[in-house]
């Protein structure tokens, strides 16, 4: 079984800021940060 990844509050804030700034699409952010596109940002 794969080990579950843990994200720091700083990482989460960075990704949310990028999403809200509109500089990148959700799909681009998922690829950039190696996240599943079914996870909600």
Image: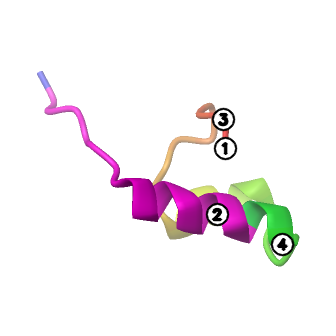
Q: Which residue is mark 2?
A: 29
Q: Residues within 10 Å of mark 1 (few under 14, many from 20)?
A: few
Q: Quadrant of residue 39?
A: top right
Element type where label 1 sits in the image? loop
Give the Cα distance between marks 3 and 1: 4 Å
In the shown orientation, is residue 6 left or right of residue 37? left
Q: Are marks 2 and 1 in contact (CB under 8 Å)?
A: yes
Q: Are marks 3 and 2 in contact (CB under 8 Å)?
A: no
Q: Which residue is mark 1?
A: 41
Tell me the magenta residue range: 2-18
Give residue 40's mark.
Answer: 3
**Where is 23 relative to 7, above or below?**
below
Q: Residues within 10 Å of mark 2 (few under 14, many from 20)?
A: some
Q: Is residue 5 magenta?
A: yes
Give me the residue at 56% from left, 68% from top: 14
Give residue 21's mark.
Answer: 4
Give me the residue at 56% from left, 60% from top: 13
Q: Is residue 6 magenta?
A: yes
Give the Cα distance between marks 4 and 2: 12 Å
Q: Horizontal and vertical percent for residue 27?
A: 72, 56
| Mark 2 or 1, nearer chain start | 2
Q: Quadrant of residue 3?
A: top left
Q: Horizontal and vertical percent for residue 29?
A: 64, 63
In the shown orientation, is residue 22 left or right of residue 31? right
């Amino acid at each position: 079984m794969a080990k579950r990844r843990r994200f720091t509050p700083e990482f989460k804030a960075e990704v949310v800021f990028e999403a809200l700034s509109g500089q990148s699409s959700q799909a681009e952010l998922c690829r950039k940060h190696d996240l599943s596109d079914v996870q909600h940002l």
